[in-house]
Image: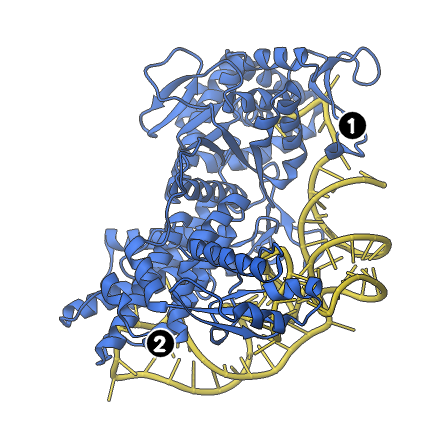
RNA sequence: GCGGCUGUAGCUCAGUUGGAUAGAGCGGGGGCUUCCUAAGCCCUAGGUCGGGGGUUCGAAUCCUCCCAGCCGCACCA
């Protein structure tokens, strides 16, 4: 809501400047650092000082003199070097937040967005690096939906790749298991494969002749027939079930699982190839080191300046298609430009749609989005750029523009975490260590969640000794989920997270539990007020009539932050910087906890003070609940 | 070599389009519980914003040159 007020004020000011000096000037307000300076600050006089060759303060004075402003601005002052500061009608703004809510969908009909995330290779347990991807993707999807975008969430399953092939080789050739034996491996199957994968990698490296087994397996996986393909299918199904269960612990779900084998079987690439060839995006190389390949030239585009090899191979000399080639075809499908569709089947046990090769039953429409956001870590920026360039070269410049790579930095293990896991970091005491599925180095997602739940349980029982059983389990799970999701979202996307056990398991300070705790406090206040027979809330109408001096700066600060929520959520969604949501949530909780100690409600006898504190508490709750909802943090009833 | 990211308190990090006294958490020191849950609050110490130069009324933020670290630049994904 504040945004509309800001725009209106900016308009007033620019008209004022125009009438005074005939200059067009636009100035957006900032929030002054301290509340006694005002609620909104326009630096317009500072910007004009040069042009008008006058002191900023004098300009500001002149603008302020006789300035007509909307009636919810109570006072205008010139402050500091020449800021034009405004004081707002606190009761009115608070009332408006209670009346209209704190977060509205955007205006107009919005086009469909596909958010693709998680994309874990189905050959081992998920680790905490995968969690960063899934949490960011999920928070983005939730945020877009809340803003009114239709969103389809996809999870891409590479069920024909080398990683899967290696595990199949491990099961069959290293362990000597048949189909039935693989089915019989006890849970947790993903943990079993985690160990097997690193073991088979060593086994393969040990004797180069064994590479032939991998090649054979890969071939069968791609063809989709043979015992190796059958065992591969079992592995994919079992691992996928583990991954979906892990993600469900975090409240993460998908609309569609897209399987690579369907892309191959349905010959998606053939269509894409025809487009790539006829548009001249790729050509057949007759000589040189890429002889026999179909390549996409990248030279000439500034984006790819300075590459050693300016040509990207799309079809190999043996006729097989590279990852990038398949991904271009898939991206075209997502944008509705391929002219082919998958078949679909509903996976009953997992309650999710997945792509299949044969004609399936009635299904919802998938794909064909106006915008596609691929959540993939920053190491793959180069490949994502090529995919985008491919779409563009075919002639879909606008669609390429709406193919967005949501890049984020990876999760590594802090030096301390590496040491606790017994992983070497090359003798450098302070160095963090990259995780590696191939080497079996990493913290498994379920292990971390278990630890977080155990810690939560311990904290809860130390305060609520009577709690046990299902209720305790649920609270512990909620708190663990919140802790983890907050941990993954509070970091800015450009920063590598060096995962540390102590930090992750710390429930104090800048943590998910800290946020939840402040909301639980609000619930408790309401319970106690009800028990004492007092009003449990202040209505919007009553808030509007509260005397201005009841709003102390600390209460008002909280309201003002909530008033900025809409703008911040919109910025977070459009810039893909979701840490802004987490930071704002933290700012609210910190503000509230301070207010909580200074301004008791239950034990305050003055009705006016009780009303204004209660109104502030309600507004805080609206704000923080909106944010925790976007962050996917469940709110426990007690802690 | 080319491209991307990073460098801010002992540690982990925020810092909106250049603005008012550079902030938070952890850790350190000190305090707060007959009163809505101490997963909390308050006080305190701690800074050459990697370095030099420049633009500006004003620079952590923009430009430029250095220095350091991480990532990427396959007929792997």
Q: Which sits in the foreground, A90 or A345?
A: A90
Host chain of mark 2: A
SS under mark 2: helix
> What is chain B's hue in the picture?
yellow
Residue A301 vs A606, above or below: the answer is above
- Residue B36 in percent (x, y) is at 26, 73
Q: Is residue A90 left or right of residue A300?
A: left
Between A467 and A21, the one lying in front of the other is A21
| Residue drawn at 46 percent across, 52 percent down | A567
The residue pinned by badge 2 equals: A597
Give the x, y percent position of residue A609: 27, 76
Sequence-wise first label, 2 or 1:
1
Q: Quadrant of the N terminus of chain A?
A: bottom left
Please give the name of the residue rendered at 59% of the width and 24% of the height, measured from the top-left corner: A327
Can residue A116 be seen here?
A: yes
Q: What SS does tag 1 mark? A: loop
Q: Quadrant of residue A500?
A: bottom right
| Viewer-side label of 2, 1 | 1
Residue A460 shows up from this direction: no
Residue at numbered disc 1: A300
Residue A211 in the image: state x and y as whole percent: 66, 22
Does A12 appear above or below A448? below
Marker disc for residue A418? none
Q: Position of residue A475 (x, y in %)?
A: 30, 55
Residue furthest left as drawn:
A533
Colour assigned to chain A in the rendering is blue
A485 vs A165, left or right, is left
Q: CA distance from mark 2 to mark 1?
A: 63 Å
| Residue B67 in which image quadrant | bottom right
Q: Nearer the viewer, residue B54 or A125?
A: B54
Few, some or many C-alpha atoms within 10 Å of disc 1 (few <14, some 14-19, many ≥20)?
A: few
């Amino acid at each position: 809501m504040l945004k509309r007020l800001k725009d209106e004020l900016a308009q007033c000011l620019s008209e004022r400047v125009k009438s005074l000096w005939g200059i067009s000037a636009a100035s957006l307000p900032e929030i002054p650092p301290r509340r006694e300076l005002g609620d909104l600050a326009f630096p317009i006089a500072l910007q004009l000082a040069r042009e008008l060759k006058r002191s900023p303060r004098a300009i500001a004075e002149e603008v302020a003199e006789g300035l007509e402003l909307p009636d919810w601005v109570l006072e205008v002052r010139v402050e500091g070097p020449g800021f034009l500061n405004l004081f707002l009608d606190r009761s009115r703004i608070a009332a408006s937040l209670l009346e209209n809510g704190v977060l509205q969908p955007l205006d107009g009909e919005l086009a469909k967005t596909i958010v693709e995330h998680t994309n874990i290779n189905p050959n081992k347990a998920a680790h905490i690096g995968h969690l960063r991807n899934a949490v960011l993707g999920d928070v983005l999807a939730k945020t877009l939906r809340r803003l009114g975008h239709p969103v389809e969430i996809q999870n891409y399953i590479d069920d024909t790749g080398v990683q899967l092939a290696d595990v199949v080789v491990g099961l069959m050739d290293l362990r000597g298991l048949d189909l039935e034996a693989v089915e019989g491996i006890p849970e947790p199957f993903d943990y079993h494969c985690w160990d097997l994968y690193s073991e088979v990698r060593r086994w393969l490296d040990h004797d180069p002749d064994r590479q032939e087994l991998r090649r054979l397996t890969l071939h069968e996986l791609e063809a989709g027939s043979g015992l190796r393909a059958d065992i591969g299918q079992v592995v994919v199904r079992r691992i996928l079930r583990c991954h979906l269960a892990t993600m469900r612990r975090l409240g993460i779900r998908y609309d569609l699982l897209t399987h690579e084998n369907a892309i191959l079987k349905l010959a998606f690439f053939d269509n894409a190839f025809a487009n790539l060839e006829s548009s001249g995006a790729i050509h057949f190389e007759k000589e040189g080191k890429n002889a026999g390949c179909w390549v996409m030239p990248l030279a000439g585009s500034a984006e790819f300046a300075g590459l050693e090899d300016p040509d990207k191979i799309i079809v190999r000399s043996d006729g097989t298609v590279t990852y990038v080639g398949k991904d271009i075809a898939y991206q075209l499908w997502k944008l509705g430009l391929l002219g082919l569709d998958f078949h679909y089947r509903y996976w009953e046990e997992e309650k999710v749609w997945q792509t299949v090769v044969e004609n399936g039953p009635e299904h919802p429409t998938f794909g064909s989005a106006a915008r596609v956001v691929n959540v993939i870590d920053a190491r793959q920026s180069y490949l994502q750029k090529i995919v985008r360039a491919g779409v563009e070269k075919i002639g879909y410049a606008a669609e390429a523009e709406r193919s967005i790579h949501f890049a984020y930095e990876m999760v590594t293990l802090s030096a301390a975490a590496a040491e606790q896991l017994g992983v070497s970091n090359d003798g450098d005491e302070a160095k963090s260590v990259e995780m590696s599925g191939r080497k079996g180095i990493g913290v498994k997602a379920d292990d971390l969640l278990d630890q977080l739940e155990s810690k939560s349980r311990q904290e809860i029982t130390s305060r609520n000794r009577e709690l046990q059983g299902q209720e305790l389990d649920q609270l512990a799970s909620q708190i663990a989920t919140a802790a983890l999701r907050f941990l993954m979202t509070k970091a800015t996307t450009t920063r590598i997270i060096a995962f540390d056990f102590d930090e992750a398991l710390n429930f104090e300070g800048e943590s998910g539990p800290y946020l939840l705790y402040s909301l639980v406090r609000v619930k408790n206040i309401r319970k106690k007020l009800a028990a004492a027979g007092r009003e449990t809330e202040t209505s919007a109408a009553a808030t509007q009539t509260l005397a201005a001096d009841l709003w102390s700066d600390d209460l008002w600060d909280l309201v003002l932050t909530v008033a900025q929520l809409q703008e911040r959520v919109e910025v977070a969604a459009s810039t893909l910087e979701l840490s802004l949501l987490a930071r704002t949530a933290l700012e609210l909780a910190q503000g509230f906890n301070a207010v909580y100690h200074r301004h008791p409600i239950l034990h305050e006898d003055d009705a006016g003070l009780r009303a204004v504190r209660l109104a502030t508490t309600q507004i805080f709750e609206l704000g923080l609940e909106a944010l925790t909802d976007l962050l996917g943090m469940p709110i426990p009833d007690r802690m």
